[in-house]
Image (cartoon, rainbow, N blue to C red):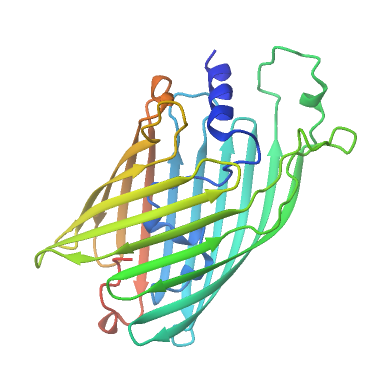
Amino acid sequence: MKNIIFSFLVFVFIGNLNAQQDAHYTQFMFNKLAFNPAYAGSAKGICLTGLYRNQWIEFEGHPVTQVLSMHTSLKDDRVGLGAAFVRDRLGPSTSVKVQLNYAYRIPFKNGDLAIGLMGTIRNYKLDFSKEAFNDMNDLLVDAPEGNQVKVNVGAGAYYENKKFYAGLSIPHLIKNDISLLPKEFSTTIIESKEETHAFLMAGFLLRLTDKIKLKPAGLLKYSQYAPLDFDIHAGVLFDQKILAGLTYRLGGTSIDNIGESLDLIVQLYLNDELAIGGAYDFTLSELQEYNSGSFEILLQYCKIRDRERITNPRFF
């Protein structure tokens, strides 16, 4: 019964397979490289980030995402290089993506503007062997090929200064067919494509006292066939050691919609280089009747080469 309810609600929320396909990240402000290549090298050193997301707990086949990324700067911080490994599972589908990023940074009087490119190789797989079906004679269940490898490209821009950042990115520009159906089954009705997603993010730093700073941030996510999704976050940094904040995610459905979730984020700075963070999403939409929310765990290590000339290196 949970599988049936889950499948129904996924189609209510998504509309069809051409809709929101990229994973959600509640801690998006600490995981920018996953969707904006221009962020590569922005730390003026080397950064490693690991993230685990478990979405809609208690649903069988619920989304689970793992991210491992690294980026560094070269040539007087003008060039940034990065790489990311992303594994995303939803029901019978599994996507494994390797992403390479390049960014070139142009210094201005009050900040830096970076232009970035990304290339991805993605292995997409469908496995219905563990699923239960009402119609065992449905030929579409057996029709999908085991897996396919797809190549894509993306681009982004990222601006940052001491107190503000903003970024715009399109992670994949090619609309690959990911239906995994042979030609005899492939039609415009049942095909699934990688749709173009656009991400607009921004944040700033506001000093309240010597030891307390406010860090608002926002992320707008757009896909042509999905509801507009917007995360707005307000975080407070205490003594540069603890960050706590709340995020409101719009999303949801058009039925009695009050939003998708209210998210709690906490991050601890263990020292100048190592931080650990966690997030919990309290579901606001109709899905709250069927699950216990979502959670994320993040671990980040950043080694800054010349910390003396970097102002507020870990804020953004």
Instruction: Name the residue located 73 percent from the left edge and 43 percent from the top edge.
Output: 178
Q: What is the number of callouts on the image?
A: 0
The part of the image, by quadrant, that contains residue 88 is: top right
Residue 90 picture location, percent across and down? 58, 34
Report the front residue among 276 and 220.
220
The residue at the point 46 percent across, 68 percent down is 39
Rendered position, 81 above or below 30? below
Residue 27: % across, % down: 37, 50
Q: Is residue 279 left or right of residue 205?
A: right
Q: Position of residue 145 (x, y in %)?
A: 80, 36
Is 54 on the left-hand or right-hand side of 156? left
> Residue 316, image x and y in percent?
33, 66
Residue 151 vs residue 68, the one in the foreground: 151
Q: Is residue 195 above or below residue 240?
A: above
Please state if 11 lies on the left or on the right of 174 as rendered.
Answer: left
Q: Quadrant of the N terminus?
A: top right
Determine the residue positioned at 53% across, 25% down. 9
Instruction: Give the quarter of the image for residue 293.
Output: top left
Against 294, is 75 above or below? below
Q: Residue furthest right?
A: 184
